[in-house]
Image (cartoon, rainbow, N blue to C red):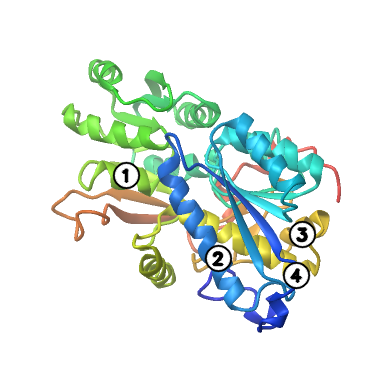
């Protein structure tokens, strides 16, 4: 589906066109993403990315001669996420599930789908634990893991000699704890110094106490490991507080950066996708904007690619059985709008893909004061380098997954 995200497959692979071909029982895809809470701003993009993927496939004739139906559920918290996953599997009879932004929710859903033998594509949760210690045969990830994010920005910082005295500011839940572990490991490996570290409750609106400590610590780099609206509030208040220590981060999302405002996100960050990386992505972003009124950000991309991958796997397998879909997921090759052939690694089911170092633009540099917020500085790994170079090393493989 070149230009639509799954370049290794053709439109005809999904099945013939026509009303009769879509008359059979639909193929059902469950989507669990936040529509409330501190991660909700990314949930809108996630849902619309998935909706676009499903619409494109249905317009091309469906999958195996069947229409695709998307069922949306709110993520909320791990307990509710488990209830929603069970409802989708037991009541709605979905053939696969995707979504989540919270790593705690993704971990909980992973346990459910493993028992039910239903494929789940994690499209927004970063914790390494999902891919390693608590990995499952039926769980795949299009979102990058913490190691991919930190290694991406770390490679740039190392090359540009920015490793000195760091101050960490981290979201206080599963995602943040794991990201802090990976970030500290990177700093220690390069003989840097940890000046200080703050764990911030999710949904925080006042960062003044943390900013005072950062000011007194006089770090060379402030390394943020925050999520959702916490990123937005931190960026805004960092500027308002007048701090000028260089900012970097173990993760970055475009939607929270947009909410903070062009000129308020000044620093170096890793992104899994950005709409200016190439013409293919730029064209897709314009299509998304015409349909939904907004440019897509990285979460829209992750869910778009997740849905396309699931449906491509069903088409290749010729079956909606969970094990058959999972086996096909391990063999498909996909483009994902990045100009390179990508794949899911077999032992942790992480999408092997390049990521991007971006620099926050000043207002004077920006051509659009609402959305032109980042300049893409570098693709990591480079065009001629192995995609596994930024992933969790094989030597750290803790997966103990049963065979198909």
Q: CA distance from mark 3 to mark 4?
A: 8 Å
Secondary structure of residue under mark 4? helix
Quarter of the image holding residue 110? top right
Q: From the viewer's perspective, is 77 left or right of 373?
A: right
Q: Is residue 138 visible?
A: no
Q: From the viewer's perspective, is 208 left or right of 300?
A: left
Marks 2 and 3, the one that precedes in the sequence:
2
The structure residue drawn at horizontal position 50% and vertical position 69%, both measured from the top left corner, is 339
Marks 2 and 4, the one that precedes in the sequence:
2
Marks 4 and 1, the one that precedes in the sequence:
1
Label ID, residue 331: none
**Residue 78: x percent and y percent?**
61, 31
In the rendered view, tell whether residue 244 sits above or below residue 378.
above
Q: Verify CB contact (< 8 Å) between mark 1 and mark 2.
A: no
Give the foreground label among 2 and 3.
2
Q: CA distance from mark 2 to mark 4?
A: 17 Å
**Residue 233: x percent and y percent?**
30, 32
Q: From the viewer's perspective, is 159 left or right of 301?
A: left
Q: CA distance from mark 4 to mark 1?
A: 38 Å
Label ID, residue 316: 4
Residue assigned mark 3: 325
Residue assigned mark 1: 257
């Amino acid at each position: 589906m070149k230009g639509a995200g799954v370049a290794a497959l053709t439109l005809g692979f999904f099945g013939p066109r026509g009303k009769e071909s879509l008359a059979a029982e639909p193929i059902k895809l469950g989507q669990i993403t936040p529509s409330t809470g501190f991660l909700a701003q990314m949930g809108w993009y996630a849902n619309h990315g998935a909706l676009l993927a499903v619409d494109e496939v249905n317009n091309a004739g469906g999958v195996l001669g069947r229409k695709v139906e998307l069922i949306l559920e709110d993520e909320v918290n791990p307990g509710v996420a488990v209830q929603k996953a069970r409802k989708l599997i037991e009541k709605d009879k979905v053939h696969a599930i995707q979504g989540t932004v919270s790593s705690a929710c993704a971990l909980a859903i992973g346990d459910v789908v493993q028992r039910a033998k239903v494929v789940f594509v994690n499209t927004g949760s970063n914790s390494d634990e999902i891919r390693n210690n608590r990995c499952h045969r039926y769980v795949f990830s299009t979102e990058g893991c913490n190691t991919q994010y930190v290694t991406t920005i770390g490679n740039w910082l190392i090359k540009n000699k920015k490793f000195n005295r760091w101050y960490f500011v981290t979201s206080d839940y599963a995602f943040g704890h794991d990201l802090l572990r990976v970030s500290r490991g990177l700093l220690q490996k390069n003989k840097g110094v940890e000046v200080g570290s703050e764990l911030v409750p999710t949904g925080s609106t006042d960062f003044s106490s943390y900013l005072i400590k950062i000011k007194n610590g006089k770090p060379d780099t402030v390394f943020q490991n925050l999520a959702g609206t916490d990123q937005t509030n931190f960026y805004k208040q960092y500027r308002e507080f007048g701090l000028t220590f260089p900012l970097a981060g173990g993760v970055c999302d475009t939607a929270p950066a947009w909410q903070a405002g062009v000129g308020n996100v000044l620093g170096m960050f890793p992104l899994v996708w950005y709409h200016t990386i190439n013409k293919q992505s730029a064209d897709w972003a314009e299509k998304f904007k015409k349909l939904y009124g907004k440019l897509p950000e990285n979460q829209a991309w992750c869910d778009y690619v997740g849905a396309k991958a699931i449906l491509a796997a069903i088409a290749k397998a010729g079956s909606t059985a969970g094990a058959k879909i999972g086996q096909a997921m391990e063999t498909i090759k996909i483009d994902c709008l990045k100009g390179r052939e990508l794949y899911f690694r077999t032992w942790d089911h992480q999408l092997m893909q390049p990521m991007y170092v971006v620099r926050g633009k000043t207002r004077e540099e920006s051509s659009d004061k609402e959305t032109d917020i980042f300049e893409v500085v570098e693709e990591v790994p480079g065009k001629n380098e192995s995609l596994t170079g930024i992933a969790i090393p094989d030597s750290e493989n803790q997966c103990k997954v049963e065979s198909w």
